[in-house]
Amino acid sequence: MSRSAGHLIVDTLEKAGIERVYAVPGESYLDVLDGLYDANIETVVCRQEGGAGFMALAESRLTGRPGIAMVTRGPGAANAMISVHTAWQDATALVLFVGLVPLNDRSRESFQEFSLPEWFSSTAKRVLTIDDEDRAGEITADALRIAASGRPGPVVVGLPEDVLVGLTEAPTPTLAEVAPPTPAPVVIDGLASRIAAAKRPAFVLGGDGWHNGCGAELAGLAASAGVPIFCDWRAYDAIPHSSPAWAGWLGYGRADAVAAGFAEADLVVFIGCTRSDVLSDGYTIGFDAETVLVSLDMEATQHAGRIDEHIIATPDSFTRALTRTDAGNARDGRQLRGGRTDEWMQGRADAQSRFAAHRPDAEAAAENPGRAGVDLGVAFGILDDRLGGDAILTFGAGNATIWGHRFIRHERPSSLVGARNGAMGLAVPAAVAASLAYPERHAVAVCGDGDFLMNGQEIATAFAHGGSPLIIVVDNGVYGTIVSHQENHYPGRPSGTRMVNPNFAAWMSAFDLGSSGAASARVSGSVPPGADGTAVGAGMIGHGERVETTEDFGPALDRALAHDGPALIHVLIDSATMPPAADETS
């Protein structure tokens, strides 16, 4: 039976278990869109290509499956570039499909033409183009495999318009199951001996690959072995924060005492991450320790400094090997302890506990009349209490997010998405994707006013597809991170950082989708009807509140969390508010 190349692409994605694609439609890949009409894949119609890419990235990080984004030619691909760079630096599996001009129009500077390889080859694992309809399924399967294998990352696939409509008899390929390498027993025994011999060993966890809960198992072994666990920046959900081994995170916003503890380690085992720029405070700490790297990346991308041993494994396969004996029984962590007492691990855990436990209270905030707006220390402490470690937090870039990192606990995997490359505009689309992938959990975006307006339009996507994210917008009227740097380098001379903002709460409240409005907005085949035949999103109303005082935040949060649909809290703070200090009590 013949079918078009575009339909074969969709069939391949469906057979591979892809549940959603995030797309901004374009005339250059109409045949793929037509294939999605009949597929058991939800087509999430986004409002901007950068938002689509960030949604796909979030889905990948939360589920462990490659995220899929689809965009059209030059302008669409340009907008999507930010998500490709983020996936590259963050090592997240992403496949970006890009509609292209017909083959006969190439190299003629035709409408929206550009060179796909020249644009993306420096920030993608592979750039592929489907020039033959018979290879459409094969190349799609290759893209999925390459994105998820080794060091995960983005793969870009070009879709020439005329090739997509070409007919093919090629079968739908099966995506091969690739079993992750398991470290040999002799390798694990050698590592166990290293850990037992060390006086101050430490594990550092990071990257993707912790979504199946292996971090909790590793944390149990580490606690019995007296080994503290640090996490890389924005990988804090790798282990439960209630673990006795939890020693805090490294990178931006970390505690001084946590960084000092990491610097004291004489053996560091990096699992899923490397000794990178951000983690090592700009290549200044943690370089003297004996170093073991656990990663599938043979090239040790982003790693700086010594490597005494490189174990090729995923976080999951490594954890299984380390926590079990050759006979399959649970390994006794005391075998890794050597002569150590709990003093080393407990000291590191206590440093993080003191840092996290200092929460300003509302009474103390009220005694500081010189500061206008909401006290974020109080507000994020309240947010943490309400969420209880179960929600999915998505973070944009900027100083406002540091408060969330400091005060919000994580107790389960797949509970944090943030751009580790510092890209702005991720928080809202990531929260939308999280609410679609896990509708039973709260999905909360934390962003500043600058970050919000870079992709805040994707709230409309949540309404169209039945998502219910909560967006917390911290408004100080400036690009706060840049102001902080300016004050350090050019004190008293702020330049190019002021912003004027709307009433974000009123904007959210403007979304009022009666049944007729939602139905008229529905695109057949893109937003499937609900069980009763009404359009997804029908009747949804946006809930927005503007909070100007600390005491008003808690009640506003309760109303937002109880709302059935997207909600937004517009939090006003003093423009002079700086991120929480890196010492234990500020």
Image (cartoon, grey):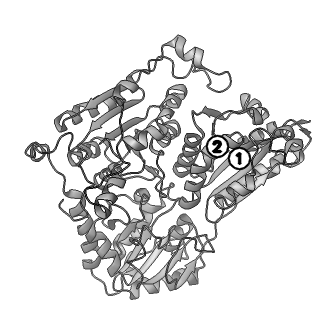
Q: Left or right of 438: which side holds 139?
A: right
Taking depth in this image into account, of 381 and 1 the one nearest to the observer is 381
Q: CA distance from mark 1 to mark 2?
A: 15 Å
Residue 131 in sight from this viewpoint: yes
Question: Could you say which quadrant of the image residue 374 lies in?
Answer: top left
Q: Left or right of 530: which side holds 511?
A: left
> Which residue is located at x 31 percent, y 57 percent?
484
Residue at which label 1 appears: 16
Q: Is residue 307 above or below residue 279?
A: below
Query: Where residue 552 sits: x, y (%)?
Result: 20, 33
Q: Is residue 228 above or below residue 574?
A: below
> Which residue is located at x 64 percent, y 43 percent?
69
Taking depth in this image into account, of 69 and 311 the one nearest to the observer is 69
Q: Is residue 539 above or below residue 491?
A: above
> Which residue is located at x 31 percent, y 40 percent?
475
Q: Residues within 10 Å of mark 1 (few under 14, many from 20)?
A: some
Screen quadrant of the C terminus: bottom left
Query: Where residue 575 sits: x, y (%)?
Result: 25, 45
Residue at which label 2 appears: 69
Q: Left or right of 273: which side holds 577?
A: left
Q: Secondary structure at mark 1?
A: loop
Q: Amino acid at mark 2?
A: Ala
Q: Amino acid at mark 1?
A: Ala
Q: Left or right of 207: which side holds 493?
A: left
Query: Where residue 83 sits: x, y (%)?
Result: 57, 50
Question: Could you say which quadrant of the image residue 485 lies in?
Answer: bottom left
Tell which residue pokes out farthest to the top in this image.
Answer: 516
